[in-house]
Amino acid sequence: MTSPPRTRTAGTAAAPSRLPAPGTVPGPGPGPDAPGPDGGGLPPGGRTARRTGARFRADTPARALRAVSARTWDAVLAGGFLLLMAAERIGAADELRGGLPLALALSAAVAGPLAVRRTRPLAGYLAGAAALSAEALFVLPSPVSPYADLVGLYSLGLYATRRRAWLGPFAALLGMAAYFADLGRAYPVIPAGVLFLWLLGWAVGYGTARRAEQREAARLLLRREVIAEERARLARELHDSVGHTLNVVLVQAGAARRLLDREPERTRELLSGMEHTGREALDDLDRVLGLLRRGAADGDPEGAAPQPGIADLERLADRLGQAGLLVRTRVDQAARRVPRSLDVSAYRVVQEALTNTVKHAGARSVEVTVRCAGGRLRVEVRDDGRGAPAGYVPGRGLLGVAERVSVLGGRVEHGPGESGGFRLRAELPVP
């Protein structure tokens, strides 16, 4: 008799549960998470989780290897060489002159220093080379231990200081003389070739270390330059914003003192302007401090608060007008559409020029011209004051203007004007 054909009980039992009920419309076919032939299925996102788990398992060995410390790898290296040398010594036990225990002890002395090849490169190499020489003179030269000595010499050139690293070639020469004391007379070419190979290994390590030192020195130099530039930029920002507003406040305070008894209403306007200017000074100070608090952390080189631009020159002129200085501004429409970096720089140039006029010129009026033509933004400030004395030296403000403009590829001219007074002119290329 033949047995009846086997049926898939699980599949047959699950089939009725997948049939649509009477009067219902069958849904779409089974998706990626639909039940399989056995009635089971993956939970939502099951395949994604399975793939993620597979990637995690694949990355785990690599992460584990990267987590191993350098000292552990050096200990593994030393242990591996020791195992190889011990196996070779045991295999050649009958040929050893001083016995197997002495040979194994010298093998440990050759391989052991590799465990400290990063922290004690010179001491480790000298100990290993001395043990290798003793092995060659009193036991039997091993074909494995010289390679441990080569790794030690390479590590000496790589991890030791310059002065100590240069002791490596001389120590290697003495070690070669002891190792080939008997063989060198019969085969003089072999010691020379081995010595060349050993010195080449030392040179590779030494050159790699010196290149790393040069890269580190270049990195530190670049870091110092960046810090110096950032300090200069912060000093320039403080001088341009806070210094200007404080000078305006002083001029307004002097005017209010002189008009206090004669023109009370005018004095009230000046005091109100001083209050407004002081608030702007506090806002500017908070913005500059934001460069320190938030700029480095958030990658925002300009701080959180927006900086003024060419559109704010009218407000700057009105502020100085309250202090008794007549400021006429002429700005063409093309200059109002320049990039933000040029927009801010043009404002700061005008601000510094007006600050110098208030502090030093004794002028009654100033003319500010900002225009954009021929791919260049031109800023000019002229006053009718006393002008520059003979042989004058630019101060921090004008030096800051020159630094700001030079960063953008422009140039600055300043000095006595054609009809007297003082003139400052800056040209900035428009990208």
Image (cartoon, rainbow, N blue to C red):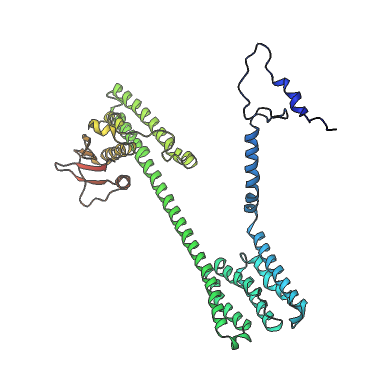
- Which residue reaches farthest right? 1
Q: Quadrant of the C terminus?
A: top left
Along the viewing direction, whichever of 346 and 30 lies nearer the viewer: 30
Q: Residue at x 30, y 34 (%)?
A: 251
Q: Is residue 424 visible?
A: yes
Left or right: 227 with respect to 350? right
Along the viewing direction, whichever of 423 and 138 lies nearer the viewer: 138
- Name the quadrant containing residue 84: bottom right
Q: Is residue 329 visible?
A: no
- Which residue reaches farthest bottom? 185
Q: Quadrant of the N terminus?
A: top right
At which x and y percent is residue 263? Answer: 27, 23
Left or right: 261 with respect to 116? left
Q: Is residue 278 above or below residue 125?
A: above
Q: Is residue 96 above or below residue 217?
A: below
At which x and y percent is residue 218? Answer: 44, 58
At which x and y percent is residue 59? Answer: 62, 47
At which x and y percent is residue 334? Answer: 24, 33
Along the viewing direction, whichever of 421 and 287 lies nearer the viewer: 287
- Name the quadrant containing residue 262: top left
Left or right: 357 with respect to 75? left
Q: Residue at x 54, y 79 (%)?
A: 193
Q: Residue at x 74, y 27 (%)?
A: 11
- Number of numbered labels in the structure image: 0
